[in-house]
Image (cartoon, helix red, strand yellow):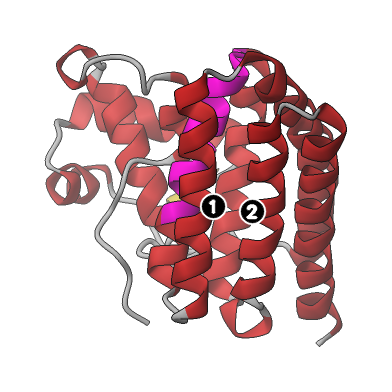
Amino acid sequence: MQHPAPTPGANASAEATKPPSKRRAADLAYDRIESLISTLALEPGQPVVEAEIAEQIGLGRTPVREALLRMVSIGLIVQQPRRGLLVSNIDLAEHLDVIQTRRVLEYLIASCSVRRATTAQRKNIVQCAEKMMRSAQRGNLDGYMQADHELDLVNHQASRNLSAVKCVVPLVVMCRRFWYAYQHEGDIVEGASAHLALAQGIASGNEAAAVEGAKRLMDYLERFALRVINN
């Protein structure tokens, strides 16, 4: 399977408002490595060699080392005796817990975005969801995932809830990686429709509609995970 060129990871949500020149090298390294993991360019179980990663993403070994340590702390990378660093495996049963936890956070973020989003952010959220729908209808998974990432960024910024965003970001990455691994079981048009419902709920300023959109999205991700597990 071909993978898209690395794009900034969901971790950029908390940093996106900073000018690129002001962002720490470790944050840039984190985003680039996160993208490699979420798109399976770095596959589950694959060894992670600091020097090779530094060369691949075009950053120094010190920021790469810091980024890798952060990823170990949230479970994207594991450290094993005598084997060094490895990309964590996808645990199917554990993935349901990931979705269950993400569900609570997505409800909170949707509620915050309804109350705090600017007019421009509301418009941008809907535009990202519509872009997802167009990509889904063309069967373009990479375009779909890129638009999904863009929607996450603006939604996280609009929520202005840094605590919730920091907690949800690793879960979003795990869900995105799960999608790339098991995309044959998914229906991206259904996924795009759920995202559009969430976006329209936020844009409308209707908190109940936004939370219902988040619920529809998480129900969809849970059904997808269950199809993978049961097959």
Q: Which residue is mark 1?
A: 129
Q: Indicate the position of residue 154 as horizontal and vertical percent values.
A: 48, 32
For badge 2, the amino acid type reads Leu
The N terminus appears in which quarter of the rendering? bottom left
Mark 1 to mark 2: distance in Å?
A: 5 Å
Task: Look at the numbered discs 1 and 2 and tell me whether their residues touch, using CB distance below 8 Å.
Answer: yes
Residue 160 painted magenta: yes
Image coordinates for residue 132, horizontal then vertical, percent: 50, 60
Horizontal and vertical percent position of residue 25: 22, 22
Sequence-first tag of 1 and 2: 1
Q: Position of residue 90 (x, y in %)?
A: 64, 62
Q: In the shown orientation, is residue 65 left or right of residue 115?
A: left
SS under mark 1 = helix
Q: Residue at x 65, y 53 (%)?
A: 195
Q: Which residues are magenta?
A: 147-162
Left or right placement of residue 194 versus residue 85 in this view: right
The residue tagged with tag 2: helix, strand or loop?
Answer: helix
Q: Dominant secondary structure of the magenta stretch?
A: helix
Q: Residue at x 67, y 63 (%)?
A: 193
Q: Is residue 163 visible?
A: yes
Q: Is residue 219 left or right of residue 69?
A: right
Residue 66 occupies quadrant: top left
As drawn, 136 above or below 22: below
Kindly identify the amino acid type of the residue bearing the numbered disc 1: Ala
Q: Residue at x 14, y 17 (%)?
A: 21
Nearest the eye: 37 or 11: 11
- Along the line of sight, the residue nearer the viewer: 20 or 167: 20
- The residue beneath circle 2 is 196
- Give the quarter of the image for residue 96: bottom right
